[in-house]
Image (cartoon, rainbow, N blue to C red):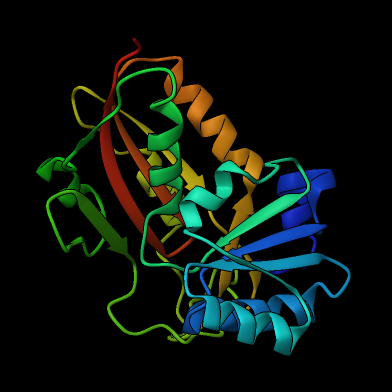
């Protein structure tokens, strides 16, 4: 997290601290996130969602929180994405991109596009599992899972961070593509999330402008990027 516990309040105002938190995923990282969030925000209504009923049952029983069985992206369709809800993605999926893709499909024709190769040279340490998705990171090492994302210094090296990756991504310049970056904020050590309303605003911005888009979710050090082409019906 930033230097002060009030950093999130400075960014998100009245919706911080979270009053409702939904952890998407009940695997190793989802469980870790739930444990740390319950400790950090004991007054918040905390829930976890996963398609694995056993995992959901174990976490919800152990932490005495609400557990919901279902596919994580689909579960957002039935959720009240209001100002007081924060989402904590803990699944190997670019949640923001997948949700926006589905939301745009209600009123138009969004098509997945590979992230253009020109982007690789504009981000630190680019890495691809496939041509569709690009990962970027300032780190060349395995980050500690308890990193609190301080403002200036890397938790692992103690050295000054070269910048904020979410700002670097905002400067990506590829002809034919607009860029939107959804910032993930550190809510607890090693646990990032964002207000659900950020997704709604993201979908609205893209829906208002047909064309090519690069959508990224990024904290200070790590990011995932996907591309789409959007046209209204």
Q: Give the x, y percent position of residue 62.
A: 71, 89
**Which residue sits at x=36%, y=40%?**
215
- 71 left or right, relative to 137: right
Q: Is residue 56 left or right of residue 169?
A: right
Q: Is residue 204 above or below residue 9?
A: above
Residue farthest to the top? 233
Q: Is residue 33 left or right of residue 138?
A: right
Residue at the far right in the pictured view: 43
Can residue 1 be seen here? no
Residue at the image position 56 percent from the left and 42 percent from the top: 77
- Determine whether 49 is above or below 118 in the image: below
Residue at point 20% right, 60% down? Answer: 126
Q: Is residue 69 left or right of residue 17?
A: left
Place of residue 65 in the rendered image (x, y in percent of width and height, measured from the top left): 76, 75
- Rendered image quadrant of residue 97: top left
Q: Quadrant of the C terminus?
A: top left
Query: At 35% across and 12% down in the image, what residue appears?
Result: 232
Judge by depth and name the residue closer to the eye, 118 or 21: 21
Q: Quadrant of the N terminus?
A: bottom right
Quarter of the image holding residue 59? bottom right
Position of 61 relative to 48 (above/below): below
Q: Is residue 216 visible?
A: yes
Q: Is residue 74 above or below residue 1?
A: above
How many tags in the picture?
0
Percent position (x, y) of residue 164?
A: 46, 56
Compare residues 53 and 122 and report the one nearer the observer: 53
């Amino acid at each position: 997290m930033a230097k002060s516990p009030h950093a999130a309040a400075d960014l998100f105002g009245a919706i911080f601290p979270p009053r409702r938190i939904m952890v998407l995923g009940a695997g190793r990282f989802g469980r870790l996130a739930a444990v740390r969030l319950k400790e950090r925000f004991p007054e918040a209504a905390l829930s976890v969602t996963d398609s694995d009923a056993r995992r959901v049952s174990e976490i919800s029983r152990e932490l005495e929180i609400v557990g919901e069985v279902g596919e994580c992206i689909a579960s957002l369709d039935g959720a009240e994405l209001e100002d007081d809800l924060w989402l904590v993605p803990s699944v190997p999926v670019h949640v923001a991109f997948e949700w926006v893709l589905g939301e745009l499909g209600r009123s138009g024709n969004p098509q997945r596009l590979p992230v253009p190769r020109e982007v690789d040279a504009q981000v630190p340490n680019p890495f691809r599992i496939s041509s569709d998705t690009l990962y970027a990171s300032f780190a060349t090492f395995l980050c500690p899972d308890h990193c609190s994302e301080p403002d200036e210094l890397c938790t692992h090296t103690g050295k000054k961070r070269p910048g904020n990756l979410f700002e670097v991504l905002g400067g990506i310049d590829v002809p034919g593509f607009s860029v939107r970056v959804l910032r993930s904020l550190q809510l607890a050590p090693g646990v990032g999330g964002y207000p659900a309303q950020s997704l709604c605003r993201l979908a609205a911005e893209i829906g208002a402008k047909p064309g090519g888009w690069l959508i990224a979710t990024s904290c200070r050090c790590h990011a995932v990027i996907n591309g789409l082409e959007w046209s209204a019906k």
